[in-house]
Amino acid sequence: MLANLTIHDVLEIAQQIERNGAAFYRKAAKSATQDKTRRLFAELAQQELEHESVFANMKKSLGTEPQQPTAKTHSLSPTAIAGLAVFGIRPGPAEQFTGKETLAEILRSAIAKEKDSIVFYTGLKGFTSDDQHTQTIDHIIDEEMHHIYTLNRALDKAGPTAHT
């Protein structure tokens, strides 16, 4: 069965993805053995929470008036849809860690998730006709791209065997 999604629904999906990302990075920070790496993951977790707040504010700015559906998708909740992409919820992004991963494995996983988030947010822009919201999403995409740069630098510093 198909269900209509409103911009409110899409923004709720984006918020869930950011919450999942924050949980992923908090867990990565706990598993880090070096202070510098722990700080990096903690900073990324905080940035994900800031993005979640941006999407919450975008949703508030739309008001409480009924929104026109913007897309058709299978009848799933925004939380479930968020779980299908990016920092998915099955298994939870934080629960995917066994504690046996190397730093390089965690970094590569984070890079892949950040790339997926860029794809999702690029698609998200198609759900809004508000120029300010589009610019805000572009800003978040830029920040996610910076996360990839930062994570790649950390991966480079992890050593030559980290890229295998």
Image (cartoon, rainbow, N blue to C red):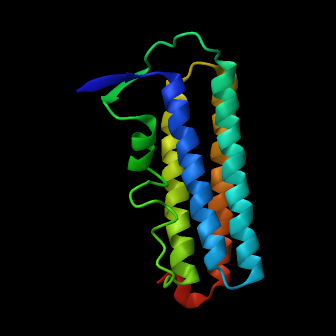
Residue 98: in sight, yes or no? yes
Note whether residue 135 is visible.
no
Give percent across and percent down for residue 93: 49, 61
Question: Residue visible at 53% across and 47% down?
Answer: 17
Q: Residue at x 66, y 63 (%)?
A: 149
Describe residue 137's horizontal placement relative to residue 94 as left or right.
Answer: right
In the visual, does 77 lie left or right of 122?
A: left
Image height check: is 132 above or below 51? above
Residue 41 in percent (x, y) is at 68, 68
Which residue occupies 59% across, 49% down? Answer: 19
Tell me: residue 148, above or below residue 8. below
Q: Position of residue 128 (x, y in %)?
A: 55, 23
Q: Is residue 4 above or below residue 55?
A: above
Res 154 quadrant in image: bottom right
Give the answer, above or below, for where 38 lies relative to 159.
Answer: above
- 84 vs 106, left or right, is left
Which of the 4 image quarters holds residue 77? top left
Q: Residue at x 72, y 46 (%)?
A: 50
Q: Quadrant of residue 147?
A: bottom right
